[in-house]
Image (spheres, grey):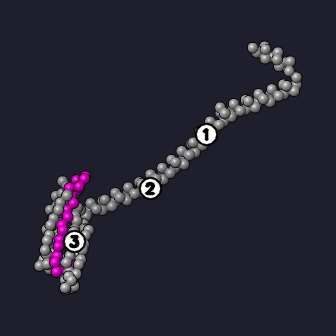
Amino acid sequence: MIEAIRARWKEMSERERAIVLVGGVVVGLSLLFVLVVDPLLAKLDRLERQAVRKEKDIQELTRLSQQYVEKQARLAEVHRHMPGPDNQFSLLTFMETAVKAADAGEWLSEMSPQVQSLPEGYQETAVSVQLIGVHLPELLALLAAIEEAPYRVTVRYLQIRPKFDAPEYLDVNLRVYSYAKGS
């Protein structure tokens, strides 16, 4: 077969040989581009896109790690202001004492506790307090007493309505929450 190609080559004119050589070089370069260069360029392009995506992932992980550290610090702060499982802090008892200290006991209409267990061993205690016909100074004294609780106590709901016939008297509904680490 090679002998046949050599014989055919010798029979060709210079012009035909030049055309065949140029055609061979074009076909060779085309094959080189299609089989080697184009896959390498495609792979480089894909790697560049992956590098950009990984860089964005790294930035997102950095941001998330900063948020995690901040939330861990906030959680540690909350734990510092939270009664432990061996502590005998009772939100209901605290609220009864706060109402008495604010001289609002005579306007107390209702006080009801609710305890709920939360995931990861936490316990949420809520106390609903209803005061009927209280004066503003007593209400402010009660809110100040809640603010100065020995542990973190949060007023999450507060509704104040003046009485229609006597606006100096207020009807107040408030809901106070406290959290504790369960045993």
Residue 72: x %, y % from top left: 34, 57
Mark 1 element type: helix
Query: Spatial distance from mark 3 to mark 1, Cα to Cα?
Result: 66 Å
Q: Residue at label 3? A: 174
What residue did someone put label 2 on?
A: 63
Inspect the image, locate mark 2, and give the three-letter code of the amino acid beneath it: Arg
Q: Looking at the image, which is closer to me, 182 or 134? A: 134
- Where in the figure is residue 127, as x and y percent of width and height? 18, 67
Percent coordinates x, y for residue 57 in the rendering: 48, 49
Q: Could you give the CA–CA distance between mark 1 and mark 2, rounded to whole angstroms? A: 32 Å
* Crowd tier of the residue under label 2, counting other residues whose Cα lies within 10 Å: few below 14, some 14–19, many 20 or above: few
Q: Amino acid at mark 3?
A: Leu
Q: Is residue 3 left or right of residue 177?
A: right
Q: Earlier in the sequence, mark 3 or mark 1?
A: 1
Residue span colored magenta: 117-140
Q: Does any portion of residue 15 appear in the rendered image?
A: yes
The mark that comes first in sequence, 1 or 2, is 1
Residue at figure coordinates x 85%, y 25% from the top left = 16
Q: Residue at x 73, y 32 (%)?
A: 29
Dot 3 crowding, Cα within 10 Å, few <14, some 14–19, many 20+: some
The residue sitting at 16% across, 80% down in the picture is 133
Q: Nearer the viewer, mark 3 or mark 2?
A: 3
